[in-house]
Amino acid sequence: MNSDTINQSNPDPIQKYVDAVIDRQPESAQTERAQRRLLGRLETDTQTVGGVKAGWGWATAAAAAVLLPMLLWMPGTTGSLAFAEVQRHFTEFQTLTAQMTTTVGGNEIVEMTIQVDDRNRARLDVGDGFSYVIDPNRSTMLQLFHPQARALLVPLNAPDAREARTGLDWLADIREFQGQAELLRETTVIRGRTAYGFSLNAGGMDMTLWAAESGEPLRLQLRPEIRAGGIETRMDFEFDRPLADGLFSLSPPAGYQLLDREHSDEALD
Amino acid sequence: MHLQSTSDASPPMTGETAANLDVHALATMHGRDVFRAAFRVSGDSAQAEDIQQTVFIRLLEKPPRKTIENWKGYLCAMATRAAIDELRRAQRWQRLTGPRLAGWVSSEPQPGVVLDDQLRARSLRLALGRIPRRQAECFALRFFDGLELAEIAEALSITSNAVSVSLNRAVNAIRDRITAIESSAQEHSS
């Protein structure tokens, strides 16, 4: 048994938080129920895995029959090259428009439009509620609260600007992704175009990126979080769509009251 | 702080190789420990059960190539890492959808709430989900599972020095967060 403290000489505030975690054990009934289900699941899955192993030669031939035409048909010579072509679109666009939809149990709860230009300026519009305009070149973000007709200018290094910038992390994750993207066997149709899926884990999140034959990304699906209430998030992409003038302006629209940061708490009142 | 030991080797599975791996026997022997390890990080029995099953199914589908001397430590580390990933996914979702809209799933303690153990545990898990994954893994393996630095290094396939650095950064980041929570609670009570 190990015995340890985070800081023996000076009681650390973390200590009681760690104790709060490790002192609370699951009930033994929960543990035993989980154990029973685990063993039951393994019974089933062991048989499945055993069956696959027994038919290895047949399965390999079948997989090759499916995969070979797909690899020959997809842009590039291998799945990873094809994905690089998809990935390229996220760095070489003039404008990118992403429509993000989040549903819980089939009910849509969030709809957000994200627009980015080739200068990395971004605008996030969340329904009719609020918008963020982020201009990294000027290190400034404009927050617009539409029902209140109020606006706030926030330096990008301020803590409250971080929330908005992290809303764009997915784009950085895909741009910087260097791991293995697995080409899925199934295809789907998105906005009338046949789409090929790549499964990948970028930024610690499992996702499927669907792209057209040309490599143009069409849709990003974040895997459902069953334990988070069946939450599903997807983004539909459109590249190089002309964007409205002034979309990334850091000037508040006419009729909006510009609050100073001292009164930022009043923005939603 | 008393930490659970995971350093005991587990005969007869010690040194088992992929070729003769008996996953069912491992599940019988260590399944409960894996469940508890996942529960410590997630705080949710249903999610811990999912993670427990994922660990053993993954073992079935993709056995480790190296010889495992300490199966209990190895499996608990797998569970802890999977649970950290789940924490991070949940946090990531909140960041993607915006904190104002995600408030209904947020477990962020509100200012002035009395800090009981349940809230402390939740706050610590929240903090773990917000620091870099490697740091969170090192922290949880060290302070939740009680692994020694060398055991963490082996589990994460990094050097002991890298573990030490990550651990130090994790403690500092979490301490900052917790200090802010404590200050907020004290201000409200005074």
Image (tube, rainbow, N blue to C red):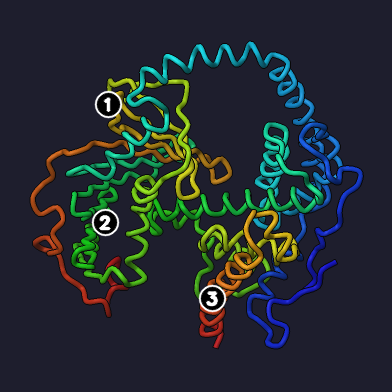
Q: Chain of mark 2?
A: A
Amino acid type, mark 1? Ser
| Residue A94 place in picture, x, y as percent | 17, 44
| Residue B160 place in picture, x, y as percent | 66, 65
Q: Residues within 10 Å of mark 2 (few under 14, many from 20)?
A: some
With respect to residue B34, does B189 lie above or below? below
Nearer to the camera, A1 or B83? A1
**Rendered residue at 29%/21% (across/down):** A193
Secondary element at tag 2: strand
| Residue A5 place in picture, x, y as percent | 73, 77
Q: What residue is shown with label 2?
A: A130
Q: What residue is shown with label 3?
A: B181
Amino acid type, mark 3? Ile
Q: Nearer the viewer, mark 3 or mark 2?
A: 3
Q: What residue is shown with label 1?
A: A214
**Rendered residue at 28%/68% (across/down):** A156
**Pointers 2 and 1 in contact (CB under 8 A)?**
no
Amino acid type, mark 2? Phe
What distance separates the C-alpha of mark 3 from that of mark 1?
51 Å
Q: Quadrant of the N terminus of chain A?
A: bottom right
Secondary element at tag 3: helix
**Pointers 3 and 1 in contact (CB under 8 A)?**
no
What distance separates the C-alpha of mark 3 from that of mark 2?
28 Å
